[in-house]
Amino acid sequence: MSPHLASRVLILAGSAVLVVASRGLATRSVHAVGAQLPYEWKLPPGFPRPKVPADNPMSDVKVELGRYLFYDKRLSGNGTFSCASCHQQNRAFADSLPLGVGSTGEVHPRGSMSLANVAYAPVLTWANPNLKRLEQQAVVPMFGDSPIELGLAGREDSLLAALRGDDRYRRMFAESFPDDREPVSVTNVTRALAAFERTLISGRSAYDRYEHGDSTALSPAARRGAEMFFGERLECFHCHGGFAFTNTTDYVGKGFPEVEFHNTGLYNLRGTGAYPAANPGLKELSGRDDDMGKFKAPTLRNIAVTAPYMHDGSIRTLDEVIDHYAAGGRTIKAGPNAGVGSRNPHKSGFVKGFTLSSRERADLLAFLRSLTDSAFLTDARFVDPFDARARASRAHSATSR
C-alpha cells in the first residue's frame, strides 16, 4: 500500500481495474459453496466496530484469502515483492526504510505507513483526501506507475492466469465470492486484500491494559508521561488522540468522519514556507498554498517499532521527534532544505514548542513505548501463510486456544 499518490496514478490504476473487472462480474446464486456467515469482530476492549462497505461484507474465508494475497509475491510484476514487503508485521505493518522502495528498485517520495487500525481511517495514505476506501487504495500499489510499487500495470491477464491456475486460490475465491460467475478478478483481489487489512487491529498494549483496570501494566514513568501527553503544555493529544492515537478516524456510530491534515514545521525552505518538491503535502492535490506541508497525523500505536519517522523518514529516533516538537519545528542549517521550521507560516497552531527536563523526556518516551502491542506484532492470524515456521506457529496458536 503506497504512501504516495499522484492523482494520475489513481486514474490509470482505476482504469485498469475497470477493464479487467468488466470481463466477468455477472452474478449467480450459488450460496451452497462457502456460505457467508456473519463476521465476528475480535475487537480490543473499548474499540468501536469498523465501517465496512456494503459491497464488500466481511467473512472469514475472504479475510483468509486476503492474507494469502497480501503475502503473495505473484502480486508483483517481477515476482519479487508482495504487500508485506513494505508492510511487515513485526514493524506494525510498516517497514524500516525512510522511503519506500518498489519491486523495480524505484525509491518512493514517502515512507510506508503502518497499517495498524487502518480499518478506522476515513482517508488513506499521507496526504490524499480522495482515497477513502481500502478497496480503492489497493489498486494504486498494484497498477500505479508514479512511483512503481508492485509493477502490475499491463500485466492483469498474467496475474489472473496465475491465480486461476492455483487450486487453492480457485477454491478460496469461489468461497469468498459465491455469487460471482468468475470469482477470480482484479476487483475481488482488492476486496479480499481490504478485508484482511480491516482485521489488522491493534489495541492491547500496556497502556490499554492499564486503561482497562490493570494498575500494574504501566510504570510510574509511563503514567507521568501519559499525563504530559494528554496535557495542554505539550498538546500532543490534539493530533494523536482517541483510541486510535490519531485524530483522523471513522467507525460505526460516529456522527461524521474526522479528517485532518497538519503542517508540523518539518521544513521551511528559504523561509517561504515551502517543503521539498517531492513532498508538498496536501497541496499536491488541492493546489492551495495554505495546504503546503500538510500531512495526515499517523497513529502513534506501536510507534516505538516504526522508525524512522515523519512522511519522508527524515527523523531517525523518538528522541529526535521530541526535539522537533520541543523546538516548535525543525531547523535545518545548511543544504537544499535549509530553513527554520518553527517559522513556517503554514504550521499548525498546536506545534508551539515546549521545554522538558531530562526526567520528563524519559517519562514521555516511556509512555510512547507503552503503546507497543506485542501481541499484535506476533499475532498468528496475520502471519505469512507461505512461511513454514509461521504456519507452524499459527497451528500451535489455534490448538492452544
Image (tube, helix red, strand yellow):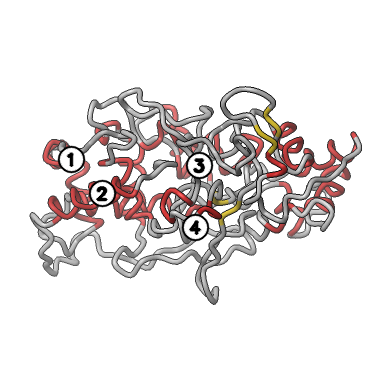
Q: Which mark is residue 121?
A: 4
Whether the residues at callouts 1 and 2 have beta carbons within 8 Å, the answer is yes
Label 2 and label 4: CA atoms lie apart by 20 Å
Is residue 33 in view from this perspective? yes
In the rendered image, which residue does mark 3 sit on?
113
Q: Mark 1 highlights which residue?
A: 163
Q: Residue at x 38, y 58 (%)?
A: 133
Residue type at mark 1? Leu
Taking depth in this image into account, of 170 and 198 the one nearest to the observer is: 198
User: Who comes first in sequence, dot 1 or dot 3?
Assistant: 3
Q: 277 or 249, which is in the foreground? A: 277
Residue depicted at 63% across the width and 61% down the height: 45
Q: Check disc 3 and give the amino acid type.
A: Met
How far separated are the C-alphas under marks 4 and 1? 29 Å
Q: Is residue 194 left or right of residue 380?
A: left
Q: Which residue position holds label 2?
A: 189
Q: Specify the label residue 286 is tagged with.
A: none
Q: CA distance from mark 3 to mark 4?
A: 12 Å
Q: Residues within 10 Å of mark 2 (few under 14, many from 20)?
A: many
Q: Nearer the viewer, mark 2 or mark 4?
A: 4
Q: Earlier in the sequence, mark 3 or mark 2?
A: 3
**Residue 362: where, in percent of width, then height?**
84, 36
Q: Nearer the viewer, mark 4 or mark 1?
A: 4
Q: Element at badge 2? A: helix
Dot 2 or dot 4: first in sequence order is 4
Marks 1 and 3, how far apart at CA: 28 Å
**Quadrant position of residue 237:** bottom right
